[in-house]
Amino acid sequence: MKKLLVLFISSFLLVGVISSSAYADAAKGQKYYLKFFKKQTGMTGAKFATQHTQAEWKDLFASDGAKFKTVYSEKFPSMKEFLNGEKFDKYMEHIKDFCVEYASDSGNVPSC
């Protein structure tokens, strides 16, 4: 009985750890913004995120970020290669969460 309980608790903790790292995170998105976008856009994270409302950001990132890629490739041609590459696809959910978390109608202000 004790072994079964230990196995159950271990499994529960493992699933908790794995599933929590699978979700997007606004703090990670802020780090990725600073690393990949700030220099290219010339904007702080606060200025960038407040360009749109939460609904507008969600719309831009819908369908694997197709509208976001189009709009920001036109605004910042130097970012076109990055936006259409694997790195952006890998970090897109985190960047989306950052933008939505600090959108113009959110009332939140990032520290970057």
Image: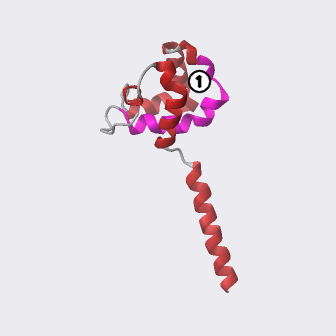
Q: Position of residue 84 (x, y in %)?
A: 63, 23
Q: Residue at x 68, y 75 (%)?
A: 7
Of the pair 26 and 67, the residue shown nearer to us: 26
Residue, disc 1:
83
Q: How is the image coloured?
A: secondary structure
Decide: is 17 above or below 65. Answer: below
The percent position of residue 11, horizontal first and vertical second, equals 65, 68
Q: Position of residue 112 (x, y in %)?
A: 41, 33
- The correct choice, above or below, for 23 with respect to 104 in the image is below
Q: Quadrant of the N terminus?
A: bottom right
Within 10 Å of disc 1 (Cα), the crowding (few <14, some 14-19, many 20+) is many
Residue at 52%, 39% (x, y): give it: 94
- Residue drawn at x 40%, y 39% is 101
Q: Is residue 52 left or right of residue 34?
A: left
The amino acid sitting under disc 1 is: Leu
Height in image: 81 above or below 56?
A: above
Asked if residue 98 lies in the magenta stretch, the reply is yes
* Residue 83 part of the magenta segment: yes
Q: How many marks?
A: 1
Front residue of 4/39: it is: 39
Residue 34: x %, y % from top left: 49, 31
Q: Residue 106 lies in what quarter of the image?
A: top left
**Side of 23 where 104 appears, left or right:** left
- Along the horizontal axis of the image, is 100 left or right of 81? left
Of helix, strand and loop, which mostly describes the magenta segment? helix
What range of the chain is rendered magenta? 80-103
Farthest bottom residue in view: 1
- Helix, strand or loop at mark 1: helix
